[in-house]
Image (spheres, rainbow, N blue to C red):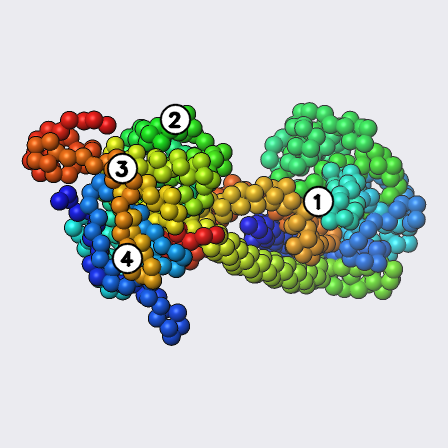
Amino acid sequence: MISIPAGATANQASTLSLSQNLVNTITQTETNINQTLTEIDCSLASGFEGFGFRPQDNGNFTPGQFGGGSVLPGNFTPGQFGGGMDIPGQFGGGAFSARGGSTPMNQSLYDDIVGISDVAAVVPMLQVTEGTNTTMEMFGRTFTRMVPDYEIMGLPLDSTALSTYPILPTNITSGRNLLSGETGVVLLSENNSAFFKAGVGDTVTILDHTFLVVGVHGSSGMEDRQTLYMSLSDAQSITNNTGYVTSLQVFASDSASVTSISSVISALHPELQVTTSQQRLTQLEAMRTNYETALANSEATVAQTQSVAFEEVGVAVAATSLIVLFLMLYTVRERTKEIGTLKAIGFSNGNVMSQFMLEGVLLSLFAGVVGIVIAAVAAPTLSGLLLPAASQVGITTNLGRGLVGTNSAATAAAISLTPELVLIALGASVLLGALGSLYPAWRASRTRPAEAMKYE
Amino acid sequence: MSETVLKLENLSRSYDLGKRKVPALQNVNLQVNKGEFVAIMGPSGSGKTTMLNVLGCLDKPTEGRVLLDGVDVTQMPEKELNKIRSSKIGFVFQTFNLLPYLNARENVELPMECNGTPKNERSKKAKELLGMVNLSGREEHRPQKLSAGEQQRVAIARALANDPAIILADEPTGNLDAKNKQEIVKLLANLNLTRGTTIIMVTHDIHVASHTERMLLLSDGKITKEKQGLHSVKKRKMCPSCHKAVTPSDKVCPWCQKELEQKV
């Protein structure tokens, strides 16, 4: 018996659960964005999503360049951003990758942005992902990808900024949030806590530096599951990014001015990619549509695999029954004399028939056991040959900033032999054996006893 | 006269070969008494095997009746014929027809399985019968480990398993060498003598046939001749009281109900 349908089903189930997960994340993100409609994303990156920029390739971010003040990295003073910072808005780079890059900032760029009317504040942030490169081999191909361990988010821990802008997570599950002016402390996510095996009050070592865990935050969707928060200066120093940031958050004074601010920024600095929250929402929705199409395609692939698998099983069932049929017919013909003898010494038609049915069933059952042993050994290899390549089924969706849906259901494509499947296979063997030997057994029972008298 | 076991009345059997009708048996009448040892002789194609098939309920006559123990078996449905074959008839074949994957004892047990004899009883009786055909100690041997003569003795033991009213043997010595032939004929004759088993044996070997009591010559589907065999002399036994013929196995005279002295 071939166990394809079960494998395909498992695959589909895995794909569906992945889908559910991503849809949840999108919904969550949409909610977040809707709450902060004044957000503007601004990035030097040419793409909305993609890889970060190496610090050395881009300009320096010098704190001193901000508003003429002597601002040290991380020592962000809200006053320097002028104006009332009452309405939060976000202004960030699109980098999300192995190593976050930096957005080069200079005095004129900063001044240009700060000088735009209705800009409330600009907040620098450094986001760096640390991970391990993993190589995996699948169906003869080698894939290398980075599995993120954690993501460092450096924020200026300033009392006014913290109290005014939602830059820190709000969902603290244990301990406390970061406080203004703190250094050497870290706020872990629940995933980080498990990764470092550390809780509130413990110390963790991040890139050879020791930090005290003051709190743990719960994640909202996929966005900050891996993110640990610390002060901007700590983040810059441990990642050797002193003087660099990966994003700037621009806070507009009110949501009505978001569009005008973004168009002014675009006009002044065409090299920047400016995205408002509204645009991001639109993009996200477009992505969701894409994603749903991808999911539908994936489901179609799985369904097709399944139907092909069922066809294969159907052919196998028919073939098995026919083989049993012909084998048993041959046996009956071969043993005509023996059957005649049995009938001559008093065996009834029923006796003979059940005898041959039993024989067919046992034969088939034995074949079933052999088949299961072969399947147990060869199924992983066979699944690679019989099922479509894993990449067709897996879904890779990059949701851009702060959102990554890079995942794959590929591993689920492997066929596994479950006890349930073994029982089904054995049951099917018995059934097919019985089916195939029905006619031969009936033929045997009709054998005339006088056949016993014949010479060979 | 002694009790009749088998009676053929105007028995005819013909085969359809295309449009031709080939008569194999024509109007045969025969009566076989209990305890008789009968040989049916005749050249090939004379109808010997057809006659044996009809006698053994393996085949149905086109005309006439076969009465086995007074019961007309020609009109019986197949289902009841199974029982008749199992309980009243024991077959011995020219090619032994033992089941190759069963040992001697299991082969002898087969007919007893048909009528539901309990297992331990079957095994006990099978050993007893194998002892009677001088195969003690070889019960667990498979047919291929036995000589032709030994295989035929197993087959004879099997034929006796359900204490049948009659044993039908189709050329039982046909596949045997001279020495084994002699042994099998002696064994059959001895069974007939000591147990009073009724035996009808088809053979074309005059030497084998001469060991029986009655020799019937079949040619062109008819019984053309009947002779007495050597066995009849050995066998003849009279009731000392009523002087009627009795079978040696009878302990009580079937005619006058007097107890008989056991000589053999």
**Number of the label disc, if any, that sits on residue B192:** 3
Q: From where the camera sits, is residue A445 visible?
A: no
Q: Can marks 2 and 4 be said to lie on one chain?
A: yes
Which amino acid type is marked by label 3?
Asn
Looking at the rendered structure, the secondary structure element under dot 3 is: helix
Q: Nearer the viewer, residue B26 or A356?
A: B26
Q: Nearer the viewer, residue B183 or B105?
A: B183
Could you say where residue A401 lies in the image, as x and y percent from the top left?
Answer: 74, 52
Residue drawn 40% across and 72% down? B18
**Chain that bears disc 1:** A
Which amino acid type is marked by label 2?
Ser
Q: Can marks 1 and 3 be said to lie on one chain?
A: no
Mark 2 or mark 4, earlier in chain: 2
**Chain that bears disc 4:** B
Viewer-nearest of discs 2 and 1 = 2
Could you say where residue A108 lies in the image, as x and y percent from the top left?
Answer: 91, 54
Q: Which residue is mark 1?
A: A167
Viewer-nearest of discs 2 and 4 = 4
Residue drawn 20% across and 43% down? B34
Disc 1 versus disc 3: distance between alpha carbons?
Answer: 114 Å
Could you say where residue A374 lies in the image, as x and y percent from the top left?
Answer: 61, 43
Disc 2 versus disc 3: distance between alpha carbons?
Answer: 21 Å
Q: Which residue is mark 4?
A: B223
Which amino acid type is marked by label 4?
Ile
Q: Is residue B184 left or right of residue A132?
A: left
- Identify the image quadrant of residue A244: top right
Q: Which residue is mark 2?
A: B136
Disc 2 versus disc 1: distance between alpha carbons?
Answer: 100 Å
Q: How many marks?
A: 4
Which amino acid type is marked by label 1?
Ile
Mark 2 or mark 3, earlier in chain: 2
